[in-house]
Image (tube, rainbow, N blue to C red):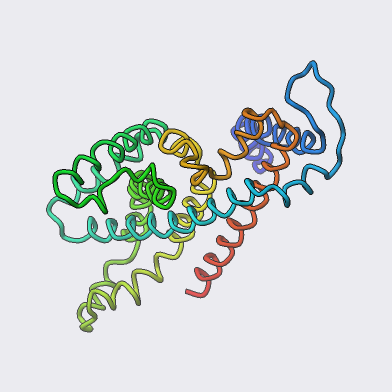
Amino acid sequence: MAKRKNWGWYALFVAPLLLIFVTVVIIPFIIGVFYSFFEWDGIRANPMEFVGLENYAQLFSDSRFIDSAWITIKFTFLAVIAVNVVGLTFALLVTSKLRTANIARTFVFMPYLIGGLLLGYIWKFVFSDVFVLIGEWTGLDTIFFNWLMHPDYALYALVFVFTWQMAGYIMIIYIAGIQSIPGEVIEASKIDGASLWQRNRKIVFPLLMPSFTISLFLTLSLAFKIYDTNLSLTGGGPANATELFAMNIYNEIFGYANYGYGQAKAVIFFLIIAVIALTQVYITKKREVEM
């Protein structure tokens, strides 16, 4: 009887969230998959023409989509490394005996509170005006110039801004992981004469694997799905050099009115993210078990 009562309470609390999830995620996803088999411009008054798998077959000959895929993979690879390295470094610093640890933690976390759209416009001003001014004043115009106007540097500008925004959030996850490590283990390693690098490599990093799993999953998924900062910082330019997956799909649907084809891109986009993210979680979770 008690179990039934508990089940009723569980259902009561879970039902609203489940209803929202089904309404906002599951149903739109199913509708999107359905539309991907049709040629349609998104206007209700116009007829939908069933084309089967033609939209999916067209993806393999779409050079713009393939270029966008490679750019997104490159951006994600660089962003995941940069965010986790910076986040972990700051986490190690602020959990050490640093007098200004709380202030440093606050300042590093603050950029995460700024919306991606606003953040893009702020850094657009920095790259296009402040960088150019610094370059003129110092003569270091090979470093300080408008990165956003150069096809080879615009993507690195996007990686830099994404890292600046996300590093503080990832830092908090690593801090929680570091603080969960038993203090006596660290003290014992110090007594045994282990150096800082040896302590981190042999004790801290292995015990941080759960934090690595969460942080890598978040940065992977967010980097793949980034749109707002991409829109406000570079707008996909110059010459489509920073048109990432999400922007390519948005432009296809709302810019070129290829609703069905855009939905096919979105389905493939979802599958790619799901496969990569689940593979990453499986590998890192396996490492947690081994530890």
Q: Is residue 16 above or below residue 225?
A: above
Task: Return the residue nearer the eye: 140 or 43.
Answer: 140
Name the residue: 16% across, 60% down: 97
Q: Is residue 9 left or right of residue 207?
A: right
Residue at the far top: name it.
45
Task: Return the residue nearer the eye: 123 or 151.
Answer: 151
Q: Is residue 143 above or below residue 234?
A: below
Percent coordinates x, y for residue 197 in the rendering: 27, 75
Q: Is residue 188 left or right of residue 249?
A: left
Residue at the far left: name it.
99
Residue 205 picture quarter: bottom left
Percent coordinates x, y for residue 89 in the rendering: 29, 60
Count of labels in the image: 0
Residue 252 picture quarter: top right
Task: Return the residue nearer the eye: 25 or 16.
Answer: 25
Task: Return the residue nearer the eye: 31 or 155.
Answer: 155
Quadrant location of the N terminus? top right
Percent coordinates x, y for residue 267 in the rendering: 70, 44
Name the residue: 67% across, 41% down: 266
Percent coordinates x, y for residue 47 in the rendering: 84, 22
Residue at the far bottom: name it.
192
Q: Is residue 177 above or below residue 4?
A: below
Name the residue: 62% across, 29% down: 255
Name the residue: 73% across, 24% down: 42
